[in-house]
Image (cartoon, rainbow, N blue to C red):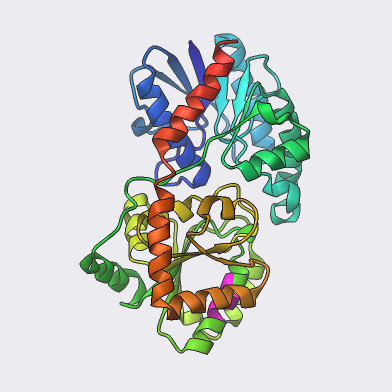
Amino acid sequence: MKIAVNTRLLLKNKMEGIGVHALNVLQRITVNHPEHQFLFLFDRKYDEEFIFSSNITPVALIPQARHPFLYYWWFEHSVARVLNQVKPDVFYSPDGFLSLNTKVPSVPVIHDLNYEHYPKDLPRLTSWYYRHYSPLFAAKAARILTVSEFSKQDITEQYDIPVDKIDVVYNAADSHYKRVDENEKTETRNKYANGAEYFLYVSALHPRKNVKRLLEAFDKVKETSGSPIKLVLVGPHYFKNSEMDEVYQQMKFKDDVIFTGRMNVDELSKIMGAAFSLVYVSYFEGFGIPLVEAMQCDVPVIASNITSIPEITKDAARMVDPFSVDSIKEGMLEVLKNAELRQQLIEKGRERCSFFSWDKTAELTWQSLEKVLKK
């Protein structure tokens, strides 16, 4: 069989949630299925580290697809041309985008529909592209993969897709994320937080990640507790986030907030392992990989009580209302002051994170692709 894959998000040292998902699934299914041929479609010069096995043929197509006009051109012209020439048995797209200009059976991974619920969180043209084309992609798809039961239900309701056309394949955490010893914690805290303990946020600084309210809550935590604890935020700015920037400038304790920018997995896993607690208060998530990364590191989790997050954490997080600064503040204060609660969250996190595995994700993805390949 020939399987074409959209690999435009396999970018060395620049991968976020969807890229991490694509990397871990593709590493496994290409190596585990040497009897099949894989055509990897990149939108730029690719790194050899993403050519995981000898049954992969990489192709770099232009243009680099990082804008709605270029999304359209890349998928409807460049990708369509290759698919129509090669005629693979299936086209697998980990970022959810498809080509409408081909009859090749297609399987997208639609991670979530945040753009349907919060369209103003994206630039206007980007929001329009997602909202216009995503229903068309979903209708065209031979099967759809998604990363939580929450997203499955959302796709069904928003796009009128039959439930039995959608398969859930949970995300997981990289093996780099593991418990670290006290010496490593001290070393990391000295490097990034002037030796202090810290709450940690990990993700792009996107409006739906709710960094604005997190900063407001942290300021109140500092004022109430008098603690020397800091807040470390790891991730790039994603689009314009002027509300977050405005709140930061008005903070009383902004000197205790540390922005690191994007980090590679080696450094990020150390920062995660040394954190006092992860604070993940997005108001919309399809999964939330940092939740599992923290649990795998024995780091207690404070998390939102809506969308997919309760499904992922179960009882292994201190849940808060992401729309309430006071609720976030109270959750942070409780974890800060209550050592017994922290230990309970660590123990429940150990148990919960064992449920998630990239091997399982890859196998379920393959089973979904096989349903299409065998037709």
Q: Which quadrant of the structure image shows residue 29?
A: top left
Q: Quadrant of the C terminus?
A: top right
The residue located at (53%, 50%) in the rendering is 312
**Range drawn in magenta:** 214-219
**Going 34% across and 78% down the picture, which residue do you hit?**
196
Residue 227 lies left or right of residue 370; in this view the side is left
The x and y percentages for residue 323 are: 68, 68
Q: Is 3 placed above or below 159 here? A: above
Magenta-span inclusion, residue 217: yes
Q: Position of residue 332 (x, y in %)?
A: 51, 75
Depth check, front residue: 132 or 296: 296
Residue 249 lies in magenta, yes or no?
A: no
User: Would you say residue 45 is visible in this rendering?
Assistant: no
Q: Position of residue 27 (x, y in %)?
A: 38, 30
Overall secondary structure of the magenta stretch? helix
Residue 222 or 79: which is nearer the viewer? 222
Rendered position, 219 above or below 150? below
Name the residue nearer the viewer: 357 or 122. Answer: 357
Number of marks in the rendered image: 0
Please tell me whether residue 254 is drawn above or below residue 149 in the rendered image: below
113 vs 231: above or below: above
Question: With 340 as the anchor, is 98 left or right in this view?
Answer: right
Image location of residue 191, percent across then percent down: 30, 70
Q: Is residue 22 visible?
A: yes
Seen at 65% across and 21% down, the residue is: 142
